[in-house]
Image: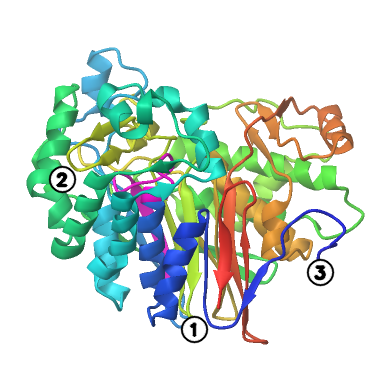
Amino acid sequence: MRDFNFSGRSAAIAANGMVATSQPRATLAGLDVLRAGGNAMDAAIAAVAMQCVVEPESTGIGGDCFVLYAKNGAPPVALNGSGRAPAKATAEWYAERQIHDIETQTPHAVTVPGAVDAWCELNREYGSKPLAELLEPAARAAEDGWVVNQRVAYDWQRLHWKLQDPVTAALFLKGGRPPVAGDTMRNPALARTLRRIGREGRSAFYEGAVAREIVARLKSLGGLHEEGDFANQRSEWVQPIHAAYRGYEVYECPPNGQGLAALMILRQLEGFALGDDSLSEADRLHLLAEATKSAYRARDDFFADPAQTPVDVDGFLSDEWAARARREIRLDAVLPGNTWHGGTLHSDTVYLCAVDRDGNACSFINSLFSNWGSGIVAPECGVLLQNRGSAFRTTPGHPNAIAPGKRPFHTIIPAMLMKDGRTVMPFGVMGGQYQAVGHAHLLHRMLDRGFDPQQAAEAPRSFAFRGKLQVEKANPEPIVADLARRGHEIDVRNVPLGGCQAIWMDHARGVLIGGSDPRKDGMALGY
């Protein structure tokens, strides 16, 4: 029970179904589907489509997605909806031109968007309602207009410099300026595209006029894309990976995502008594930071598209690896040498989850990668394109080197918690590179400290990254000072770390308990 003398939000509690997203209108879109008899997958698709309209800086149909779905309490299945590099993209091509990094705002950062194909596949396999019905609320919002919420307006103002391309500015800078909270925005071209996808399925996006326009726009800017790259895009059903933590099983999508890193952090933390009051909060944050370093070094050196570069998942999840990494951790000092590439720095995505009255649970993440993705818009279809290709390396021979048809290393990761063979909680933590740490921190707060999903989502965050310990301003100064004394170089963040949604399934009482991060605009809501 939270202390009502202090600011905060109560967890959402309901019996029949629940949706949690980072935008109220998206939560309502998903809840409307549940109340009309749809299942958790239907609700998730309707909600994520709405997010692609009302939170355009973070997600869109020009991006990618990953999904975990647990049907009637069975172990989850996973869909990898990440897009691929063009067939002409080779590391040698970039090396010959002295392109050492793939810059965000270039056509080379644009991989083929995977989200639409994934939505269609999920709807075909697990949906109970027509895709056109699920996409229509989002299409209406794009056509009639939506009111911009506070966090979205904040990000729009903060990063509107990425929208200076005249084509992009015409769509997203009304009157040449970013909107403020309460302004109404529209994207009628996107409404037409969403309705066409609803009627025709994946071919409406990957073939015909939409694909032609996107490819022409990218090629005009120097991109290597061809229409065949779009026609060949397919999602892939993959086997989830999992590891134990405090008597539960944590399920993640396998590489090319970073879910494996989240499990590696948890495997290390399993060996520390984090629930014991003999440890201070500074102790716990320090241990989280130190466990992050070894997992992220492995992540950046070895995680890649397993179809082209094998990843030793079993080895990284082994008792031997966890014990070896844990032995390096000292409670009174930081690990030396904690500098590594760390990938493209970004902090925005959307994560949502849904649970229906039959116990089906969906964990769903959809992203453009960086805020506003590549900043490149195809105006006739209203599609803003992702910059996921900037996660590739251009060094020939690196596991994550760009290659024809290859999927880049991905930061976006949905998750699912299971216990005794039953689904307990779909959850996810947005925040780009932070996400794997966010998963571990959330579960630590809930399973070690007894927080509910809302309390865990609200807890102050920290992140050991690129040689510094990023800390949110909400972390108490004595704790930050304690961490500094141990050797952490402190980086106090002006922008908060990520966002979170989670729905706890209390099977004994037959209720759902949801949390939604106050760092965003959204809510968890059930009926």
Q: Residue at x 89, y 35 (%)?
A: 478
Q: Position of residue 469 (x, y in %)?
A: 70, 31
For label 1, count other residues whose C-alpha is less than 10 Å away and answer few (under 14), some (14-19) or many (20+): many
Q: Quadrant of residue 128?
A: bottom left
Mark 3 lies on residue: 1
| Location of residue 404 with respect to 189 vertically, above or below | above
Q: Nearer the viewer, mark 2 or mark 3?
A: 3
Question: What colour-coding does the image apply?
Answer: rainbow
* Residue sticking out furthest to the left: 208
* Residue sticking out furthest to the top: 98
> Quarter holding the C terminus?
bottom right
* Residue sticking out furthest to the right: 278
Mark 1 lies on residue: 357
Q: Is residue 370 left or right of residue 375?
A: right
Real-space Cα separation, disc 3 to disc 1, in angstroms: 25 Å
> Which region shows up in magenta?
53-69
For label 3, count other residues whose C-alpha is less than 10 Å away and answer few (under 14), some (14-19) or many (20+): few
Q: Secondary structure at mark 2?
A: helix
Mark 2 lies on residue: 230
Residue 57 among magenta residues: yes
Q: Nearer the viewer, mark 1 or mark 2?
A: 1
For label 2, count other residues whose C-alpha is less than 10 Å away and answer few (under 14), some (14-19) or many (20+): many
Q: Earlier in the sequence, mark 1 or mark 2?
A: 2
Query: Camera-side residue: 58 or 193?
Result: 193
Real-space Cα separation, disc 2 to disc 3, in angstroms: 50 Å
Q: Secondary structure at mark 1?
A: loop
Query: Camera-side residue: 266 or 39?
Result: 39
Residue 515 among magenta residues: no
Check if mark 2's residue and mark 3's residue have beta carbons within 8 Å: no
